[in-house]
Image (cartoon, helix red, strand yellow):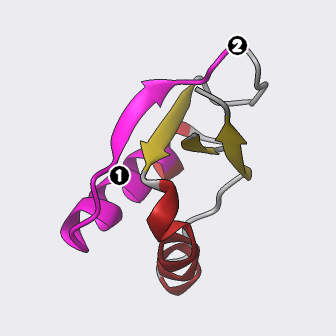
Amino acid sequence: MTCIATFYVTHMALMFERECKNAGYDVRIVPVPRKLSASCGLACRYPCRVEEEIKELCLSKNIEVEAFHRLED
């Protein structure tokens, strides 16, 4: 299972990556998978096991996420 966050704007994807890395999470900016559609062409991949913690971090840092997705590998 792969977890992906999508964003409305590039700035939020970059902010998500920076804040998650600062908090010690293993995240990586990736192109939005073809299965998904988004206004921004960037997404962030992150470990599914920390999804709830990452959602809380986004709320506390005012990071606007379009959606959180779980994709089968």
Q: Which residue is mark 1?
A: 17
CA gap, disc 1 and disc 2? 21 Å
> How far from the left and from the top, in percent, is residue 6?
64, 42
Q: Earlier in the sequence, mark 1 or mark 2?
A: 1
Quadrant housing the N terminus: top right
Q: Say which residue appears at 24% left-offset and 60% top-offset.
A: 21
Q: Say which residue appears at 42% left-offset and 53% top-offset.
A: 47
Q: Is residue 15 left or right of residue 43?
A: left
**In magenta segment, residue 6:** no
Viewer-nearest residue: 24 or 1: 1
> How far from the left and from the top, in percent, is residue 49?
48, 64
Q: Is residue 44 left or right of residue 19?
A: right
Q: Which numbered dot is residue 34?
A: 2
The magenta segment: 13-34
**In magenta segment, residue 33:** yes
Dot 1: within a 10 Å radius of its alpha carbon, few (fewer than 14), some, or many (20 or more) residues?
A: many
Quadrant hosting residue 34: top right
Viewer-nearest residue: 2 or 12: 2
